Amino acid sequence: MNIKSDILQLSKKFFEETHKKSYVPGQDYLPASGKVLDAEDVMALVESGLDAWLTAGVFAKKFEKDFAQFMGQKFCLLVNSGSSANLLAFATLTSPQLKERQIKPGDEVITVAAGFPTTVNPIFQHGCIPVFLDVSLDDFGVLTDQLENALSKKTKAVFIAHALGNPYDVAAVKAFCDKHNLWLIEDCCDAVGAQYDNKKVGQYSHLCTVSFYPAHHMTMGEGGAVLTSDPQLKKIAESFRDWGRDCWCPPGKDNTCKKRWDWDFDGLPEGYDHKYIYTHIGYNLKATDMQAAVGCTQLKKLPGFIEKRNKNYKILRAQLESKLKNHKEEIIFCDALPKASPSWFGFPITLKEKNRTPILKYLESQKIGSRLLFGGNLIRQPLYKGQNFRVIGDLKNTDKIMNSTFWVGLWPAFDESHLNYISDHLVKAIQG
Ligand SMILES: Cc1ncc(COP(=O)(O)O)c(C=O)c1O
């Protein structure tokens, strides 16, 4: 008897017999987003559990290699969430090893206020000053013509997310960063697979980040990644991720450097074990091998998930354009910039005049999930009250997003009938 293969086959059977396969509009809740798992994912999870390795191991190694390739980057560091990825990416740039380019407390970082807080939090967490720019209401992208206005002698970096999978003009942002010798971090948590000018997002920046929370394009429950093609940044990020140590041995391995007791660090006893030499004030942000195992099987399906979300965007958009009379007077759709190929995360709508809350309550009563553009205008949220930041202009569009924007789902589990149901009720809610 092959116990392992029996357990895996039983896991498959269990999943197929117990997992919900179809969602009936009106009867089942249609979430704004969610994971799509199959028996293969659950079998990978069980297999990694049976290995009983638990910490990052063979699956994590494979995932990091394959995901780096998918994103067109040299290196991928798996972490335990997208927020941890943002923290790690920013922390990396505070390393003294970066010499005069090291980000220090009091330095400024250009970003936007329309979005998710953990894109901005690392800036505050390192004693730096966010400088908030407004975004366009047509695509939610940063207003790149205002970048120069945000610049000061203290500016060290730009750190901006591609909101809801729709790329901003990252080529213009990169040109600005190159001109002024600034670091660029792209938060691609909502935008895996999106492209700008035929190049995947994430490739424009020094470091980019991804989330594998269930709402995102692929999942491992909790999880995230930092990607880069710069070997020095990879080494520093790995150190910050793994307790701040200088040693780079993977879990369970020793003496990868082949000189474990032969390093010479100023102030340390001769021959001090490299495993316990620390060069950064780091964290432990590693993920487990069970998460990575699910990541490996989800990654195979990622191109299909992205394609389905984009297809669903097109269908819902066409349905709404035909069903909503005079839609231009009622709402603003979110459009892609001419050179952008989005990897849509959700379907955003901005109401021109109407009050949003009754619309969202109506959708909820019809079992249709909705979400806001996360924190709206983050500077109005309680968390940044009394904090030190600068604002460029009046953030008028960011305020409009806070008051009037919402999004509904493009979940890959939806087909035309679900989207038809959603668009029917959206039209009812908006036009009465
Ligand atoms: C743009 C953006 N960045 C970061 C995050 C945080 O990711 P996580 O939930 O994996 O911490 C999110 C979460 O949805 C997000 O939308």
Image: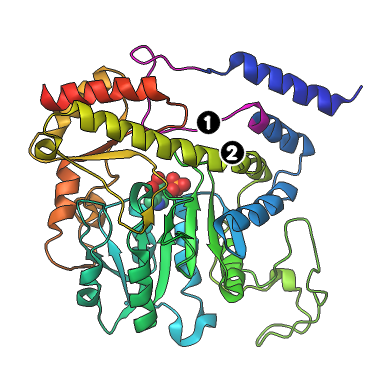
* Mark 2 vs ligand 1: CB below 8 Å: no
Here the colouring is rainbow
Mark 2 touches mark 1? (CB < 8 Å): yes
- Disc 2 to disc 1, how far (Cα)? 10 Å
Label 1's element? Answer: loop
User: Which residue does the image show at 53% across and 70% down from the upper left?
Assistant: 281
Quadrant housing residue 419: top left
Residue 349 relative to residue 287: left or right = left
Stretch in magenta:
22-41
**Rendered location of residue 134, percent (x, y):** 20, 61
**Rendered location of residue 77, percent (x, y):** 60, 59
User: Which residue does the image show at 23% across and 77% down from the upper left?
Assistant: 148
What residue would you read off at disc 2? Answer: 301
| Type of the residue with mark 1 | Val
Label 2's element? Answer: helix
**Rendered location of residue 63, percent (x, y):** 66, 50
What residue would you read off at disc 1? Answer: 36
Q: Which of marks 2 and 1 is in front?
A: 2
* Mark 1 vs ligand 1: CB below 8 Å: no
The reply to whether residue 127 is in sight is no
